Image: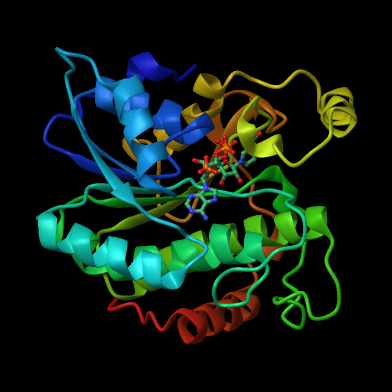
Amino acid sequence: MWTKENIPDQTGKTILITGANTGLGFETALALYGAGAHVVLACRNLKNAEDALIKLYEPNGKGTLETGVLDLSNLSSVKQFADTFLQKHKQLDVLINNAGVAMPPASKTAQGYELQFGVNFLGHFALTGRLYPLLKETSNSRIITFSSNGYQGSVIDFDNLKSETGYDAIREYRQSKLANLIFSVELQRRIVAKGVKVLSIAAQPGANKTELTRYLSEAAIAAGVERLGEFMEPWQGALSSLYAAVSNEASGGNMYEPDEGGYRGYPTLATIQENALDETVAKKLWGLAEQVTGVYYPL
Ligand SMILES: NC(=O)c1ccc[n+]([C@@H]2O[C@H](COP(=O)([O-])OP(=O)(O)OC[C@H]3O[C@@H](n4cnc5c(N)ncnc54)[C@H](OP(=O)(O)O)[C@@H]3O)[C@@H](O)[C@H]2O)c1
């Protein structure tokens, strides 16, 4: 059983976490700060980031903390955040693409894409690509991207990415989490093809009590618990991504998840379903993301 006590000393490492002010991102920041890392809390606005820093900060804390403003629903904000980060930092050991929005009322990004596809996937695609040169320069660096069990059975509907033919909150969430996983696997393929040492690893955290359900009714949340069983506390849900971020056993192109059916438990290797491994879809999605974001990876 792998848990927080297994995290090796992270002193000297710079770790960037998106959406670090709540839920799994906050718990991930807490664990890595406690292990000695310099943790950059990239949050939607400065207040959220500063509140998180105040909650995390310990006078004799082993690690160090920094805040940054990153709104993944706006590609200009992503560029501004990345430009500032690259000016300030000489290394990036781990990028954790954690932030996510789930099942909001129909809404769009600044660039007109369906919000979940835009925030969860396009924003992180752009962020990772802009920071890639620094990740490449940092030895043994890793990129961790959050997916979800919900990716299973989903498809990328290339004709409806701006909700042209309708909006279904759950379907679009599952699509965005499939896009996250396709991206993580495809990035590793491209890294390997170039003989680069960066690792791209996916994680899915199982079912957790976080603010991700903020747009759902009490009845819908209760139905979820009825179907999936009791949700985990966020510290436990954060373990799969922590494992991906720091364990020497974690490897590129894989996904890690809780060991009890993927919904509860402790980190284990997940079996990735065929819909996330289709290379034709991956190339098409990658090309679309490059075109929309204007970010072309310098692999
Ligand atoms: N909880 C689960 O059971 C579960 C299951 C499967 C997958 N996941 C995945 O786990 C990750 C973390 O989710 P969570 O459960 O910790 O949810 P959460 O408590 O709602 O946290 C989500 C984080 O993402 C941030 N975020 C949302 N929109 C953003 C934007 N436009 N720009 C920047 N940050 C933004 C939120 O910021 P604000 O607070 O400002 O909104 C918050 O910090 C997500 O990728 C989610 O899809 C969670």
When the figure is inspected, residue 243 is found, relative to residue 92, above or below; the finding is above
Q: Quadrant of the C terminus?
A: bottom left
Q: Nearer the viewer, residue 130 or 259?
A: 130
Q: Is residue 79 visible?
A: yes
Q: Nearer the viewer, residue 210 or 296?
A: 210
Q: Position of residue 59 (x, y in %)?
A: 16, 13
Q: Residue at x 41, y 70 (%)?
A: 126
Q: Is residue 179 left or right of residue 77?
A: right
Would you identify the image quadrant in which residue 296 lies?
bottom left
Q: Residue at x 12, y 56 (%)?
A: 88
Image-quarter location of ligand 1: top right
When the figure is inspected, residue 293 is found, relative to residue 105, above or below; the finding is below
Outermost residue toward the front in this view: 47
Q: Residue at x 59, y 18 (%)?
A: 233
When the figure is inspected, residue 297 is found, relative to residue 214, above or below; the finding is below
Q: How many marks?
A: 0
Would you identify the image quadrant in which residue 223 lies?
top right
Q: Position of residue 207 (x, y in %)?
A: 69, 30
Q: Is residue 153 visible?
A: no
When the figure is inspected, residue 91 is found, relative to residue 208, above or below; the finding is below
* Colour pattern: rainbow
Q: Residue at x 88, y 29 (%)?
A: 227
Q: Position of residue 87 (x, y in %)?
A: 12, 62
Q: Is residue 15 left or right of residue 96?
A: left
Q: Position of residue 127 (x, y in %)?
A: 37, 64
